[in-house]
Amino acid sequence: MIRRCGATLLILATGLLLAAAPAPLRTLSMAAGAVKTLDPILADDVVSRNLVAAVYDTLLQYDYTARPYRLTPSMLTAMPTASPDFRRYDFELRDDLFFAADPALAESDRKITSRDVGYSLMRIADARNHSPVYWMLRGKIAGVEEFHRRSKSASRGDQRIYDAGLPGLEIHDDRRFSIHLTKPDPRFLYLLAMPNAAVVPRKAVEKYRDMFARHPVGSGPFLVADWINDYRITLVRNPDYRLEHFAGAETPADRHRRLPLLDRVDVRLIKQPMASWLLFLQGNLDFNELGKDNSDMIATGGELPVALRRRGIRLLRAPEFEIRYLGFNFNDPQIGGNPQLRQALSLAYDIDRRVEYTGHQLLPANGPLPPGVAGYDADWRHPWRGPDLPAARDRLTAAGYPDGRDPASGTPLRLTLDQSGNTTAHRQYGELAAADFAAVGVELNSVLNNKPRFYEKLRQGRFQLFRLSWIGDYPDAENFLQLFYSGNIGSCNRTGFSDPAYDRLYEEILPMPDSPERTAKYREMVRLLADRCAWIYEGFPVSCLLLHAWLENYHPHDFAFSRLKYLTVDPEKRAKLRASFTPLTLKELQAPAPKPDQGGK
């Protein structure tokens, strides 16, 4: 009897221990490149910006699953209300916002107030900070340019300049404030969802000064637990992050779990894409973005090889919010005043060859607007889109260069293409362009520059053609159409394109909110640009991402800056699948996917 009771107690004790065993930590393993800074106002590269969004919070954010993209409140109780003329926006902060505990902050300093928001925006405009994103506020918030001017003469450590605030930042109380703009701007709110506009604590900035970039004190979903230069950054969940849930989580139970869903994020700072690729194949990274090199390695007509599908690996493909193009110098005597020549060059430019070169990671473009924004028309085709060599030769004749030759001298037309780098890829792109133009008799000299020299040439107008790209800052066509407005010549309008009809349309759409009328004007502007042949549109890069089966909630999104808070992993599924992995051969990675009638399971 005693023996039976002892056995029963042992079984009960074992059951209690098993029941009390904590769930395994949800740890995401990912790769990133170099991290320059974690100061929001200095983060101008993708890696730094996205990590800033993991440890700081912004007033607004993008809905993670809604398409088209739309803004939602983040630190706010509701979406800001706008005045009828879009010159004033009123805000109300949530009541559960706290900066992370830090020696720089007393407990009473941790509650986020309207003054923290005003201070954070003013830091962007402080000339002493040399913020690369001052363009966000320049000419927008009332008084910001005067503050910028005064800050230039203030001593480095003098923070009193912030005490007076800005005329355009009206503080009502700890939770309510208004922003007054210098002119109507229905797109202003997009800027407040950018990680650069994240809210920071003044006392922490003043305590850590230049080291604030390495000692973040935020209110975002994660905290920085560890940062080893060029090796690793470790994030852990912030226990004081505001209450938020993700109704779209793949696992139903996670829809009721507070964000972030992850407990920990291990960010490996890896500079070589091939190293990330190998770690992913081993199951040591949970997702991996394909570049040209490893996309060629598994190129199988857009389908994953059987060996990867058997591991449960998924492939996500989505066009990015970026346009690659060749720009013309409209002040160049040969090109600027000769639209027929620009049309001929555009028709000779073989877009299909670029798609193949990138491993089908390029979506051909018919205009400057990417898919997903109002004004993009998937059914419309650019009239001068190549390749069409017979039409290109006709336009060359109309341009005064039959067979690509100058009739006066009999010599081939010679042009120069400037590029923004001197890598193998830049050289190969130059060779592709030279071959395209040579097919119609035009000689092209591709010049490889380092970045400082390249941008100096653009500023000085010492070029004929150049190749570049533009990444959208927010999901509105205006962000791309501004590149052709004559008022932006010398800044984002790098070609010197100037057209009165286009300028008139651009000025008309600036104060217009989203509407069918505005979309119609966007399309009219795109067609006008096509008629003038302002650029050679190359295409929109297509991101290709591989995901292991244990990773959940990953959705392609160009503006999911704080994506990490939605992601999660299944640790048990990961352990089981990784245990089944065996090394893959190159032959297995390149084996084509089976036809539908060939099985392949």
Image (spheres, grey):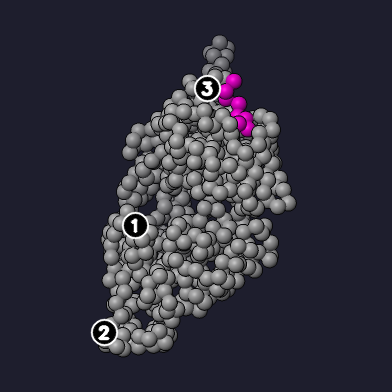
Q: Residue at x 49, y 68 (%)?
A: 498
Q: Which label number is shown at residue 456?
A: 1
Q: Amino acid type of disc 1?
A: Glu
Q: Which label number is shown at residue 411?
A: 2
Disc 3 target residue? 105
Against 287, is 17 above or below?
Answer: above
Q: Position of residue 484 (x, y in %)?
A: 50, 65
Horizontal side, residue 271 vs residue 336: left or right = left
Density class for disc 3 (Cα within 10 Å; few <14, some 14-19, many ≥20) is: some
Density class for disc 2 (Cα within 10 Å; few <14, some 14-19, many ≥20) is: some
> Between residues 417 and 169, which one lies in front from this camera angle?
169
Q: CA distance from mark 1 to mark 3?
A: 44 Å
Q: Is residue 95 magenta?
A: no
Q: Position of residue 142 (x, y in %)?
A: 60, 44
Against 573, is 243 above or below?
Answer: above
Chain-order first, disc 2 or disc 1: 2
Against 152, is 488 above or below?
Answer: below
Q: Quadrant of residue 152?
A: top left
Give the magenta part as a residue range: 108-115
